[in-house]
Image (tube, rainbow, N blue to C red):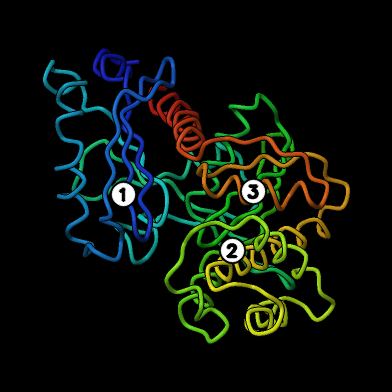
Amino acid sequence: MSDATHAGSDRLIAIDWGTSNFRAFLVDRSSGECLDSRRSEAGLRSLSSAEFPHYCAAQVGDWREEGGAASGAKSVPIYLAGMVGSKRGWSEAPQLDLPVSAADLAAHVVPAPGLDNAWIVPGVKIVDATHVDVMRGEEIQAFGALSLCNTREALCCLPGTHSKWARLVDAQLVDFTTAMTGELYHAVRFHTLPGEPARESAEFEAAAFDQGLEAAGHPAGILHALFEARSRHLYSGLASEQVGSYLSGVTIGSEVLSQRRIHPQAGEVILVGSSTLNALYRRAMTAVGFEVREIDSDQATLAGLCTLAEQHQRKASH
């Protein structure tokens, strides 16, 4: 290993860059500790391809200088995950076929054009006769969750606009499924007649959420259960301020019920998300018999990118 590489290896910059948000973390590689973080709403929708390197450099340039370049060492490495690697992002990184390990991701990182020692992490995909699916960013969190839980096998739920359920066996991602739960909830709440009473109130109502969980199991399916927000509001006492929580219960409940059917023998689910979403998903999961272990999504991102960076830097040094 060269002196420059070794001198610049005590820190790394981990960036999760999605469609609507930018999250950057300065990390101590030896401990995995987050030394500093920065966030903004400058996601893919607000930048052109040519703007990505300039925006990234402006956000983390001082971290790179303090951690390396100012003392003559190689610039602090940057690893970027998420939609930043899509066709509409900074530069397209491949989406690998399953099964995939953290080492496979590290072996296929691509240089980020216009910025030295910056690497875009590939995503993953499934393309077969019965299942076509894609993922960017959540695979890093899933591997991070494995590391934090000190296990090689897990069923992970990564809730969000497009929720992911990922199955890992022997430290490899072997299967995943996407559910557009968050996007469907937003569309129904703000753009349909059943969601109309919920336009003004965002307060969580536990009883209404539980009604939604129960309705999600209706034999007529989620399309009927969502419409019941209208009929229950008219004739069954569902107040305007409860409609949003009811719709949340239906959408999350339907997602969790589907996964319970797909994984009937699963005991524990590792829930990787924010505290707000985790609380809702925990409620839905325990209702169908899952045991839940929670991991903060930022911590999972850091752990996953640290694991990948070690693999990549080790390979580059040989």
Which numbered dot is residue 54? none
Q: Amino acid at mark 3?
A: Cys
Q: Earlier in the sequence, mark 1 or mark 2?
A: 1
**Which residue is located at x 45 percent, y 25 percent?**
310
Q: Quadrant of the C terminus?
A: top left
- Distance between mark 1 and mark 2 Cα atoms: 28 Å
- Distance between mark 1 and mark 3 Cα atoms: 22 Å
Provide the secondary structure element on which disc 1 rests. Answer: strand
**Disc 3: CA contacts within 10 A as few (<14), some (14-19) or many (>=20):** many
Q: Amino acid at mark 1?
A: Phe
In the image, 124 versus 250, the foreground residue is 250
Q: Does residue 153 lie above or below 193 as drawn?
A: above
**Left or right, residue 306 beside residue 240:** left
Q: Earlier in the sequence, mark 2 or mark 3?
A: 3
Task: Return the residue at label 3.
Answer: 157
Task: Return the residue at label 1.
Answer: 22
